[in-house]
Image (tube, helix red, strand yellow):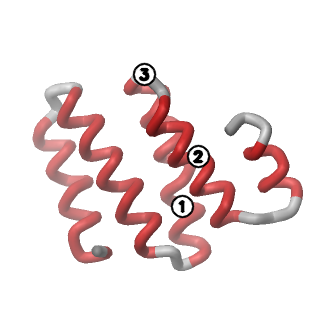
Amino acid sequence: YNQALPLRRAVGDRRGEATTLNNIGLVLGEKQKALEFYNQAVPLYRAVGDRSGEATTLNNIGKVYSALGEKQKALEYLNQALPLN
C-alpha cells in the first residue's frame, strides 16, 4: 500500500488515494495510527462524491472507537455512516 499511495497522489486519483488510505487503516494493528489514515480518507471520498467509500470509512472509524472503549464517539461515526448507506 505504501507504494500505491504516492502513485495515486501523483496522478491525482483522489478516490484511489482514499481507498488506499482506508485499506492501510484496515491492516494496521495500531488503532490510533489507523484513525489517522481513516481521517485522511474521509475528506477525499467526500470531495469525489463517493458516499459508499465515505460510509465504509466512517464505519471503520466507529469500529476503532468502539474497540478503544469510546462507545459514544463510535456511535457518532456510525450514525454519520448510516444515511450514506
Q: Is residue 55 left or right of residue 48?
A: left
Q: In the image, what residue occupies the spot 68% across and 39% down?
A: 1
Give the CA separation, mark 3 to mark 1: 23 Å
The picture quadrant where one finds residue 63 is top left
Query: Who comes first in sequence, dot 3 or dot 1?
Result: 3
Q: Secondary structure at mark 2?
A: helix
Image height of 73 relative to 19, above or below = above
Residue 13 at what x, y percent from top left? 75, 65
Give the CA separation, mark 1 to mark 2: 11 Å
Q: Secondary structure at mark 3?
A: loop
The residue beneath circle 1 is 43
Q: Amino acid at mark 3?
A: Gly
Q: Are marks 1 and 2 in contact (CB under 8 Å)?
A: no
Residue 48 at what x, y percent from top left? 60, 75
Tell which of 9 and 70 is nearer to you. Answer: 9
The residue beneath circle 2 is 21
Q: Residue furthest right?
A: 10
Tell which of 30 and 75 is nearer to you. Answer: 30
Residue 12 at what x, y percent from top left? 81, 64
The residue beneath circle 3 is 29
